[in-house]
Image (tube, rainbow, N blue to C red):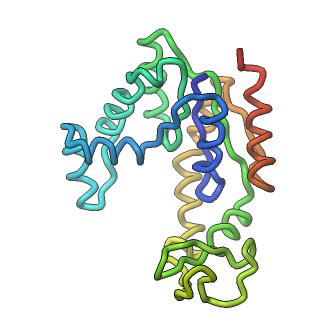
C-alpha cells in the first residue's frame, strides 16, 4: 500500500506513521530520515542539501524530490511505503504522481490527521524539556506542577518552538502551504480525514479502519 500522511505540527504524524507502517510491514519514509541518510552517507545529493541546511535555508524542491525518488526506488519500498513530510506542496505532489506513473504505480490513499488548532497549541505549548537529560514532560498530560524533572532532577524549560505565539505562527504557515495540497488530494479522490484527537491507540485504530478496505 502506498500512503501519504499529512497533518499540522502536533497532530502526532510521527507516532502514527510508525504504528501504521509497522502494521502494514512497509517502510516509513520521512524527508528528515532521507536528508540525514544522504548527508551522513556523503552522497552527491547529500552534499548539495548540506550546503542549504548549513545556512539554515530550505533544501530546494529539486534536491528533495531527487532524494525521495532514489529512496522510493529501493527494494523495500517496492510493495508499498508511507510518506511522512512529503509532499509539502502541490508541485511536489504533482511530481510524485509523475514519478509513480513512470513505474506504473500510484498512491492508494492520503490520510489527513485532523485536529483543532487550540488542541495543537495545548499539546505543543504545554511541553517542557529537561535541560539535563532532554526528557520531555507535559504540564497537562504528566500533571507537572513544578519545573523539576522527575527522572534526573534537572530544570525544565519551554523551548522557543513550543511557545504559543510560535506554535500559532507555525500553524498559519502550515495552513498556507498545505490547504492547496489537501484540496489537490481531495480532487484526486484519495483523501481521507482522520480525527486525531484522543488517545494514541484510538487514533491509530481510526487510521487502520480507513485503510482496511484497501488491504488485500
In the image, residue 49 sits, relative to residue 154, either above or below, namely: above
For image coordinates 20% across by 44% down, the residue present is: 48
Q: Position of residue 90 (x, y in %)?
A: 49, 35
Q: Is 158 located above or below residue 55 in the figure?
A: below
Query: What residue sits 55% from the left and 80% below the top?
Result: 158
Screen quadrant of the N terminus: top right
What residue appears at the point 47 percent right and 27 percent down from the top-left corner?
Answer: 94
Q: Please give left or right for residue 20 compared with residue 157 in the image.
A: right
Q: Examine the rendered structure and indicate whether residue 13 appears above or below residue 133.
A: above
Q: Where residue 105 sits in the image (x, y, percent)?
A: 51, 14
Left or right of 130 on screen, residue 204: right
In the image, residue 80 lies at what x, y percent?
A: 54, 23
Is 118 in front, or is 41?
Answer: 41
Across and down, in percent, residue 191 comes to: 68, 31
Query: Would you say 70 lies left or right of 196 here?
Result: left
Please name whichever residue, 82 or 66, is drawn nearer the observer in this view of the structure: 82
Q: Quadrant of residue 17?
A: top right
The C terminus: image quadrant = top right
Q: Residue at x 57, y 22 (%)?
A: 107
Task: Tell which residue pokes out farthest to the top in this image.
Answer: 104
Q: Residue furthest front?
A: 152
Residue 100 against residue 142 in the figure, above or below: above
Amino acid at each position: 500500500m502506498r500512503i501519504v500522511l499529512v497533518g499540522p505540527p502536533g497532530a502526532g504524524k510521527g507516532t502514527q506513521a510508525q504504528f501504521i507502517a509497522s502494521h502494514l510491514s512497509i517502510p516509513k519514509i520521512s524527508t528528515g530520515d532521507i536528508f540525514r541518510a544522504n548527508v551522513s552517507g556523503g552522497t552527491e545529493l547529500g552534499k548539495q542539501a548540506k550546503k542549504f541546511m548549513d545556512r539554515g535555508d530550505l533544501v530546494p524542491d529539486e534536491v528533495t524530490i531527487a532524494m525521495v525518488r532514489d529512496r522510493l526506488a529501493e527494494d523495500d519500498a517496492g510493495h508499498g511505503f508511507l510518506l511522512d513530510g512529503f509532499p509539502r506542496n502541490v508541485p511536489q505532489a504533482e511530481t510524485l504522481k509523475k514519478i509513480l506513473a513512470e513505474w506504473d504505480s500510484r498512491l492508494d490513499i492520503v490520510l489527513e490527521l485532523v485536529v483543532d488548532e487550540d488542541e495543537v497549541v495545548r499539546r505543543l505549548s504545554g511541553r517542557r524539556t529537561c535541560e539535563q537529560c532532554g526528557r520531555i514532560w507535559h504540564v497537562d498530560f504528566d500533571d507537572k506542577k513544578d519545573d523539576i524533572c522527575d527522572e534526573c532532577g534537572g530544570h525544565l524549560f519551554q523551548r522557543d518552538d513550543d511557545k504559543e505565539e510560535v506554535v500559532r505562527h507555525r500553524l498559519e504557515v502550515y495552513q498556507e502551504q498545505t490547504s492547496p495540497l489537501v484540496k489537490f488530494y481531495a480532487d484526486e479522490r484519495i483523501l481521507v480525514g482522520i480525527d486525531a484527537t484522543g488517545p494514541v491507540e484510538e487514533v491509530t485504530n481510526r487510521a487502520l479502519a480507513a485503510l482496511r478496505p484497501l488491504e488485500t
